[in-house]
Amino acid sequence: MAQDILRLSAEQLYKNEIDALIANETAPVPKGWQMSPKSVLTYIMGGKAGDTVITPKYMGDRRVVEICIATLVTDRALLLIGEPGTAKSWLSEHLTAAINGNSSQVIQGTAGTTEEQIRYSWNYAMLLAKGPSFDALVKSPVYNAMETGTIARFEEISRCASEVQDALISILSEKRISVPELSEEVAAKKGFSIIATANTRDKGVNEMSSALKRRFNIVILPTPSDMQTEIDIVKTRVDQMSKDMELCAAMPTDSDFEKIVTVFRELRQGKTLDGQLKIKPTSGVLSSAEAISLMVNSMALAGSFGSGKVTDSELAAALQGAVVKDDDKDKAAWEEYLENVMRKKGRDYASLYAECKERNA
Amino acid sequence: MAEYYGVRHLSPACAYYVREFLDRTQPKAVLIEGPSDLSGLIDGLCSPKVRLPAAILAYTTEPPVHTVMYPMAEFSPEYQAMSWAKAHRIPVEFCDLPSGSLLYTDDEEEEEKEDEEMPRAESVYSRLEKVTGLDTDTFWEYRFEHSESYEDFMAAAGEYGRSIREFSESDERNELREAYMRRRIKDTEEKYGLTAVITGAFHTSGIKDIPCSETDIKLTDKLKTAESKSTLMPYSYFRLSSRSGYGAGSKAPGYYEMLWRNRIGGTLDNTAPEYLSRLAAYQRRNGYAASSAEVIEAQRLAETLSVMRGGRLPSMSDLRDAAVTCLGHGSFGEISLACADTEIGTKIGELPEGTVCTSVQEDFMHQLKELKLEKYRSASVQQLDLDLRENLRVKSEKSAFLDLNRSFFLHRLLQAGIHFGELLSSTQENATWSEKWNLSWTPETEIQIVEASLVGDTAEEAASAALNMKLIESESLSTTAETLYQALLCGLPGCIKAAASAVQRMAVDCASPFEEGKTIGTLSAIVRFGSIRKLDPAPLTVIISQLFLKFCLQLYSACICDENAAGEMITAMTAVHDACLAHDFLDSGRFRTILTDVADSDMVNPLLSGYACALLAEKGHMSPEKLSELVSRRLSKGTPPAEGAAWFEGLAKRNRRSLIGRLTLWEKLCGFISELDDEEFKPVIIALRRTFADFTPAEKSDIAENIGEVLGISAQQAAEIITDVITEEEQQTIDELDDFDFGDI
């Protein structure tokens, strides 16, 4: 059964780890949680529970995760902000999996999300037949979370219209939801909270109202702090994906990974790795996720149309596509990078430089 | 038997409990870690006229200047011990090596001396971090600053001292210091009786209950010493926070003072809300919203964070992280200024007049003597002329470059805010080798020198610090380049390097080719004339190349602009053109290619297009055929007349001689003008008048001759017409042109 499912949820995939952590619990467990904050931290960052090894789910700053968990302990809502591909949704899924054993109470924010999807809607057949009653109520994930004292997730909150987002204000400040049609009010049980995610690149599309922002603790997820971590992340994921997709190409070499991650990091941070030179960043999103898809893309290219081995020519083509997104500005910035930085990196980069230069001309 | 108390410098809890320790032990004398020959300064430091922070400073009198510094704030345990002893009228002295020996270095040791306890200390702390999972400051705060009773604190402190001793090795120098301390303890005990010994926790384990031995006495009998002087000096929280290393400073003196006030007030729990409220208050003062609700949420989050890490109260890192999340909405940048204000603070110490004699003063006097400037140290203004070139008639290098070194010195003083010399503007243009100064000595100068000691130990250091500050503050490419130039004047290679990389950083964000061109001009001049000030041009050439590349990439699109911008672009293009001629390392081919595009394009501003032609033609990079083709096209019927005129204006901006000699050009121009009707003629005549306005009379008559040739009249007649007095009627017509509306051109 499970093998046929394209993607298992976090609590299904890591069931044995969660069970081990619960079995070995020593610290006090907050109301509505299934394990203590410390165990949640161990689940996310990796470690041991009894004899069971807990794999790290999030490679990055431990402190960030500590702040996230502490926020949820204080019954505040959590807003994760970051560039695309900084593991926002990933982290929110695993947090809810560890805290409640249920990561499925999700609202996906889109331009079409309505207030009913946040609060509740009606089963109209039942409503007409029986009149307003709890039976005719269709509860939203948030409503469910309030009733059960668990955590609901709100993905890409900044994609939905501001007035829709504002439906959360009263829910978060009064911790209750009123159903005027039934003259009833449902109070949230202890343990209820919301984890929302938002993309920095969506800033300004639907600006969150300050009233709503004030009800969230905001944590900005950083891009991987050091080079090696990022190379590891990219490599592990590329390996997994190429196996899943059965690409007929050899894994790119370590030096290929290093080159791509170097270029990405330098452009993203706006300076060379040694910090000596400042670089003009380009407009494209150069996250680790983008690097992963770039690598997978080159592998697919090489496998289907090339020699089966990723060469500088494939990398250059993929880089051109990833870096020069917008217009002439990107092109000029990329040329500046090539001339000022890559050309001076020496022999290892010589052929990549030549390929990139040719493509950007 | 002596009583021992190990401290962490600048720790409020240590400072608080040292008084209790002294109250309990009731010693007859107090010894404190510090140069034993400087015990005389303790009185001055404890005087009620002193406002802390202040520091005890010892420095070598011979260059290079080395210093040792003992900064004290109100929450320094050493200071509290001193004032306790003063209040109880018992002797208090220092017990470390005399300052001369502390400052003494073998030449080989030099490097290590720089940060005395750093390498060892770092390894201890990183091990500690591994064991506890907390950074040192947080660990210290949880364990010590928040401790609730004397017993708790003493037990924890003893354990801490022992373990850092265990994790680290003691070196020869440290052995010597501790041997000396043991000897001093023995002597003091014999003289006064029960002695309390206050030293760094690391040393306590090395001297506690170890009697002074024969070897100690032998070891410390003959100490190598360096010539040195000492003084008290005012200090600042800012400087305290910028010094690194064990015991030398504190990252957050403002926050620690808050801890201290709350500790002596018995309200330690209030520190966290006070910190957060101060952040919020700062934010509000500076126009940001910060609600009480956010402060409350931050407080709750900080508490939870500290509980998760096993602390009783939130530490500063918990508070700051919570503040970032709640008050800063996730980003540190939003509250960074508020954090600096609260954590570091702006407090500056004060000392009574006449008590200060800092190393900057000493350095100043020394340099005056060295540079033979002593006679200028008088109230009357005297002029000094400097010739910076190497004086070839003298033998020693020192006197050959005397004037250059004088110039460096005077410029450094200016940067350090010491107005001893005033630079007069030079009468001769571009005389980079000559400078004129007015020198005079006023009481203000004296004060400025003492103030400079707050930023550095020598005039050179103070100037460097001031320049680095300017770099941090400067916001535009050209001001940064200006700072680079000043660093060159001061002869500070370190600063030049820092400024160069700042220019590079600025250059990346610069979107205006005009600024870039101007900066290329400035830098190119620095490289060309810097040799007189012994400049190493290598780092600058890299930046020039980068700016040049960027300029080239933007040049074409920047040339599509209005008339005002075109004027600026001409300045920039000229600067880059000159730089290309002066430096081989620039890819002048790239610049030429783009100039050719600009010259050829009908899209760009015609003035710039003409100017590009002029630049290319000047160096023979445009064939006469091509030029005459362009002239024909630009001055033909298809081109709007005003554009044609502007193009000609651009072309005539350079190499006039060769233009004048080119008869075909004048033929084309004459043809162009004669085909115009009245309405078209007006804008053209304005542009042409502007074009020829800055030609010399001789050039004008040459042009007249050419035109005469074209129109078939004699040169004489043509010149007469041109130089003739304008009639009233003509004048009126010309005046009317002033009101001409150019529309969109």
Image (tube, coloured by chain):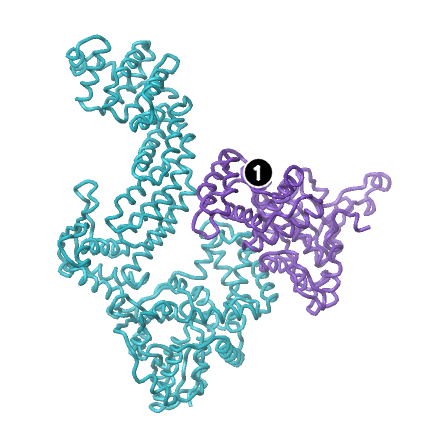
Quadrant in which residue B444 is drawn? bottom left
Chain with colour cyan in the figure: B
Q: Where's residue A175, x and y in %?
A: 68, 53
Q: Where's residue B228, x and y in %?
A: 26, 73
The residue that appears at 24% across and 64% down in the rendered structure is B363
Circle 1 crowding by C-alpha within 10 Å: few under 14, some 14–19, many from 20: some
Q: Where's residue B387, x and y in %?
A: 17, 50
* Quadrant where the image shows the C terminus of chain B: top left
Query: Label 1: chain?
Result: A
Amino acid carrying label 1: it is Ala
User: How many numbered circles does the render carry?
Assistant: 1
Q: Nearer the viewer, residue B319 or A215?
A: B319
* Quadrant where the image shows the N terminus of chain B: bottom left
The residue that appears at 54% across and 79% down in the rendered structure is B152
Asked if residue B412 can be seen in this view, the reply is yes
> Chain A colour?
purple
Quadrant in which residue A13 is drawn? bottom right
Q: Does A331 appear above or below B7?
A: above
Asked if residue A204 can be seen in this view, the reply is no
| Residue bearing mark 1 | A317
